[in-house]
Image (tube, rainbow, N blue to C red):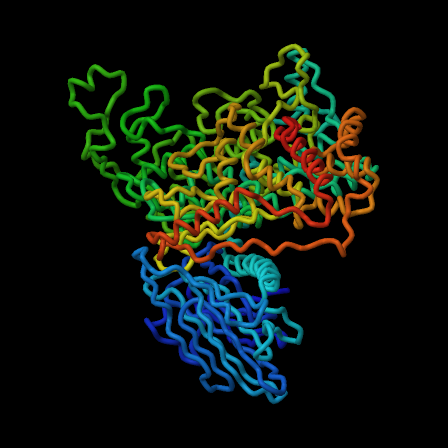
Amino acid sequence: MALTMLGGGLGGRAAQSEPPPPDDVRFEVFEAVEKESWPAADAAATTVFGHPTFALPALPARYDEQGLRADRQVPCVLRASAKVLLPAGPQRLVVRGRGALRVSLDGQAVADLPGPKISSDGHEPMFVPDRSGPHGMRIVQPGDRQAVCDVEGDGEWHDLVVEVRVGDAGRRPEIGEFAASLGPPDAVPTVIAQGGGGTPLSDTGWREIEASARAAIEAANHAARRQAAAREAEFWSERHRLARERLAAMPGPVPSPAADRSAVDRFLDARLAAAGVTPAPPAGDLDFIRRLSLDVRGIIPSAAEIARFLADRGSDRRERLVDAFLADPRWADHWVGYWQDVLAENPNLVNPTLNNTGPFRFWIHESFLDDKPIDRFATEAIMMQGGTYAGGPGGFELATENDVPMAAKAHVIGRAFLGMEMNCARCHDAPSHPYAQRDLFSLAAMLGRQPQVVPATSSIPGGDERLARLSVKVTLPPGSEVEPEWPFPSVVAADAVEGLVPDPGDSRALLAALVTGPANDRFPQVIANRLWERYFGRGLVAEPDDWDAEGPSHPALLAWLGRELVNRDYSLKALARLILTSAAYQRAALSADRPAVPASLFAGQPLRRMSAEQLVDSVFSACGKPFDVEAMNVDIDSSRQPTKSLNLGTPMRAWQFAALGNERDRPSLSLPFAQHHVTVMEAFGWRGERQNPVSRRDTDPNVLQPAILANGVVVKRASQFSEASAFTAMALESLPVDEFVRRVFLRILGRPPSAAEATLFGDLVGPGYAVRRLAPGTVVQPAPEERPLGVSWSNHLTAEADIAKGKLADIAARGDPPSPLLDPDWRSRAEDMVWTLFNAPEFVFVP
């Protein structure tokens, strides 16, 4: 299913008016519509696109002229129109959406519903599902509206136009489960599809529609970004050409000659030889593919990928596997969590409090999905443009209840892109770093585009006598006014950005150019060091955020990597390939019986534990189940403004989770299904709240980690042989018992069992294996457990909301109902095997 973007309309321009393809429904979005009004028939839309079906779960993103996600201007109206065939006889047209609805057929109004009047005081009545429709029809979801129109069909084509107005009173512009469906009055209607066919408006049908539409929306968003930023891309292409020319005129370090070794290895070999250290041998194939998959995509490899790699006998198969994994869109997923930490992304689902930001996670994801040059990525972060609440880098600028927000951002930027730790300089001159308070506040002034006044809260109280007794100096008294000027001429000259800044008077743009411009050799080396640390567990500079603490272990290699990043147009993916294809990266882990070898020599891979995101994503990848969690949203009926409640969507990868706390700590605002995943991630170092930036999480083991895996719901769900489980599907195949055990090992641990393990687990699941599958005629399929719906901010103060969330918590704790197709005794023992392998220490480490 494809969603075809037709009009420009991005950044507020009028859309082009060419019609959608003949097999598509035409969708138009009109922004900044007058309150409680509708756009004229010939009004210019800001976005126009075609889609094969008359259903959408969400609007495509809006992008500005730089290709950045932008906030939509509310209220806005979604209009969908198409030619619809009305079969002869009585027909029922069912239209759904969030907000006021207007439906017309052949230009005649057939429905006109006002928008819902939902109070956000917390005392609204609980949602009561309307089950008056035909059996099997999906109920109208909380916050949505439904118009039902009975018409007499004549077997002819008719013009159907549906409009829904969203975002009234400044609320989030969400369309809910927007759909138009048609069918006989006593049957489940079918969502209208151009060209015939269609999907029933049932629970299963809507899940299919939603999955297909979201994939189409993502593809359309990608195309829209490229179209919107075409001129921006030309600017960066020219800037990169200038950067390459500059390097060509400045010879850099050259690795020692060795025809059969990569340049990375030639730099490292010289140090190893000088130290008299023999490096570890190459890692085995199974260790290599698991390490590479975790490092590049953030998940363990599938059994099918392992089998294909082992069957490939080509001499360059490892390089081709590197290329295949780098081309996988999950490369982008794996980077989001890292940059959320580094840039301190800290959105709050409800009532943003101290130092919260907007949710710029979607800009991070799209940047890596597009392989955006890292200098452009850093520039966009510094410029802080795009949407504040829609997921653009404008969310980075937001810093609620912060006395000097631009000083906080300057601290983040200095660490992230220059390796400068200026935390102490917020209140005084840094005693152990070469940074004065003026340096940080000069950057803050550049970001703020005006002189920055030092507040009393950014100083040490107590007066001159107390300060005289301290070992730190306060050289900027409260009330000092600091001008916007570049404070680090030793890194790059302040005038080294000629031609890179369209408006030289824009100090924020000047700062971005000084940090990321071709004349700044430190920036690409800082980025290269970050990449190196991700793949080796230690950077060439040990502290990625603090280059003043310790110099590089391999200065020539670091300088060469920085130059290679520039020569490859700042593509992080291209630089990653140089590292991943090196012998150094592909070495086996250093064995415990070897004499101590300094980590800075990179003689072998250290033992690295999975990150929290890798762990959760890998657990569900292995069992084949979806997360099955709530949306990151406590305002499901859209009663509040985006400044008060965010909707971050339903997580499908671990980086999409968010902090679940609310300042009132009310059970009715809890998200019990998501909470189990967040609890695991927090035990393994994930931070839902990121008030300060970090590049290296706490990786020390703690007693909670094995406890939560052994006793928590996440691994319990992954181990349960339910209908959605890949292990259930394997158990229903006609496999010998030893092959079943082998496949389970491959899915979880990425290797076949040893002889002892094969015997152990064969003895566990062998008895009863031949009769494990129950005859279909003897199976009674239990009815699915009904989950309470509709708890939202609008009703969270009611007793019924607390009771409903309590029931949801009970359902979440029980996990998944077992498959009735398997003998219960055998299934229980097979689940024990799977649970044991998930709890094996081996599972949580990168080989």
Place of residue 345 in the rendered image (x, y in percent of width and height, measured from the top left)? 42, 42
Residue 615 appears in which quarter of the rendering?
A: top right
Residue 430 visible in the displayed image: yes
Q: Residue furthest bottom?
A: 154
Q: Position of residue 368 (x, y in %)?
A: 55, 46
Q: Which residue: 36% across, 19% down?
A: 432
In this picture, is 504 found above or below 45?
Answer: above
Please name the residue shown 50% across and 57% down the image.
Answer: 229
Q: Could you say which is closer to the camera, residue 423 or residue 617?
A: 617
* Residue at the extreme front of the image, as rendered: 778
User: Picture quarter containing residue 761?
Assistant: top right
Residue 100 pos. (x, y %): 40, 72
Residue 223 in the image: state x and y as whole percent.
57, 60
Is residue 499 shown to the viewer in this render? no
515 left or right of 329?
left
Q: Is residue 347 above or below residue 641?
A: above
For the residue pair 516 and 138, the one nearer the viewer reads as 138
